[in-house]
Amino acid sequence: MAAPGTVTIQKLTLADADVLLALSKKTFFDFFAHLNKPEDMEAYSSVAFTPQKIQSELSNPNSHFFFAMLNGEIAGYLKLNYGTAQTEFQDSNAVEIERIYVLAEHHGKKIGHQFIDFTLKEAAAKKLQYVWLGVWEHNQKAFTFYKKHGFEVFSSHEFVLGSDKQTDLLMKKAISLS
């Protein structure tokens, strides 16, 4: 049993689909609703946050979801994509962090740091060369967080939220296989 205040990382299964769906929608709206038009948020949500979409993602053998558990409660989640599940590149020598979301009430508890450490260990164990991700160019807090963890911008791509074409900065970090 983990000590009180200790975060454990737990892999999800298809049985977690409903909980993941609710958490995904909540965290996405909590972080981005105040920065975007409601109609764009709803348009994106109607496609990205459906039971079918979540079940499909959970069923993909190259996508892995994890909950951060704190004192027996879900504090956030992580989605990693390998191989053909990656949104771009589909590089067999890399893993994509597609999502890291931590519930607002758990910010400041180093859960995001633990997700990054977990991902780097997973990538090293699989002998991958790098970890990559996309971060919205206007999400300065996330950009600074990833930069602090050694991620560097290497490209960008368009992310469409409803009718709003946004730019995500693509960042990566090489894996040290020592």
Image (tube, helix red, strand yellow):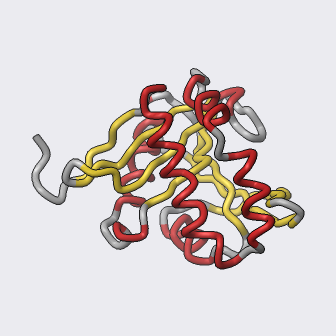
Q: Which image quadrant is residue 51 in?
A: top right
Q: How many marks?
A: 0
Q: Position of residue 17 (x, y in %)?
A: 50, 34
Looking at the picture, does residue 3 appear above or below residue 123? below
Q: Which image quadrant is residue 111 in?
A: bottom left
* Residue placed most toward the observer, 168 or 127: 168
Which image quarter holds the N terminus?
top left
* Residue placed most toward the observer, 35 or 149: 35
* Residue placed most toward the observer, 64 or 148: 64
Q: Position of residue 33 (x, y in %)?
A: 65, 71
* Residue positioned 43% across, 33% down in the render: 16
* Residue positioned 29% across, 48% down in the render: 69
Looking at the picture, does residue 138 appear above or below residue 115? below
Which image quarter holds the C terminus?
top left
Looking at the picture, does residue 107 appear above or below residue 130? below
Q: Position of residue 7 (x, y in %)?
A: 25, 52
